[in-house]
Amino acid sequence: MRNGSHLPARAGVGFKPAHFPDILAAAQPVGFFEVHAENYMGAGGPPHAQLRTLRDRYALSVHGVGLSIGSMQSLDRDHLARLKTLCDRYQPESFSEHLAWSSHGGVYFNDLLPLPYTEQTLARVAEHIDQVQTALGRTMLLENPSTYVGIAESTMAEVDFLSKVASRTGCGLLLDVNNVFVSAHNQGMSALSYLDAFSLKRVKEVHLGGHHEETDDTGAPLLIDAHGSPVADAVWALYAEVIARTGPLPTLIEWDNDVPDWPTLRAEALAAERILAGDARASAA
């Protein structure tokens, strides 16, 4: 079985077809591109032609959004087979999925929904990850979610749940720093305390994205993980703290809604590159 993530410890971005001409115009200062697996499960056409061109020039990360790892129901075998076909075709340096569920009873909800952190769900998530890793012949990374409320049935903290899943299955962890910030704000926790308890040694990749603020039914501020704006200053600061603790890690800029032009997205990646390079120089000194 292929182990872990082999992405370069640099900044990457999510690929958007609108950016394809700009990306091809010259070599780009990014370490890798990420695509959502479900967008490339067809047999061919322009999406695959573009992806093959990118794959020939850059490292590739495949990020799943539809496996429903956290569901108490069985994994969709057809979906898993299509995912295997995609990974076999492009041999990405990394594959990752979310700690969430998104389907039930044959209905797909087009959202990443939370799950209770219990021994029962731990066993089910571990079982599903074992199935995915066996089918793909590679270890996967599991991403921490953004949360908005706690679930009363939970019997363990999220960081402990993730650590136990990784220990049982051998999977790696994908640390979404914006998700940490959003969840901590929404649930009145400390983001730094979350990082103190997180199994950073298992982290193989980092995600950064934007969020926006709404108000809940009581008028209190509520942060939404929206991926439609620049990375917030507070999230950059939290990311710098992570890199100071871990050393350079592959870092993805997520911007999926209200997608900007290529120079704007590239500038976000370059900001992450500066933090990575600064840590690298400090480590070498």
Image (tube, grey):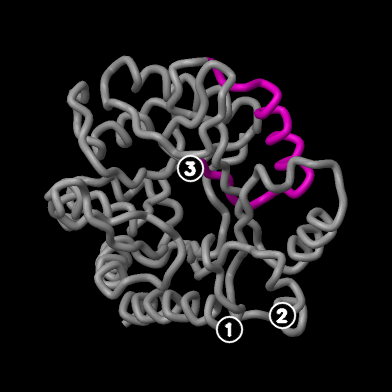
* Residue at image point 32% right, 15% down: 120
The residue that disc 2 covers is: 22
In the structure shown, which secondary structural element does the residue marked by tag 1 occupy? helix
User: Disc 1 designates what residue?
Assistant: 263
Q: Which residue is drawn at 80% across and 58% down?
A: 52
Q: Which of 44 and 225 is in front in this view?
A: 225
Q: In this view, does 18 lie to the left or right of 96?
A: right
Residue 109 left/right relative to 200? right
Q: Distance between the residues labelled 1 and 3?
A: 29 Å
Q: Earlier in the sequence, mark 2 or mark 1?
A: 2
The range drawn in magenta is 74-97
Callout 2 touching callout 1 (CB < 8 Å): yes
Q: Residue at x 34, y 76 (%)?
A: 279
Q: What element carries label 2?
A: helix
Q: Position of residue 37 (x, y in %)?
A: 65, 45
Q: Position of residue 103 (x, y in %)?
A: 52, 26
Determine the image quadrant of residue 137.
Answer: top right
Which disc is residue 141 wearing?
3
Decide which of tag 3 and tag 2 comes sooner along the chain.
2
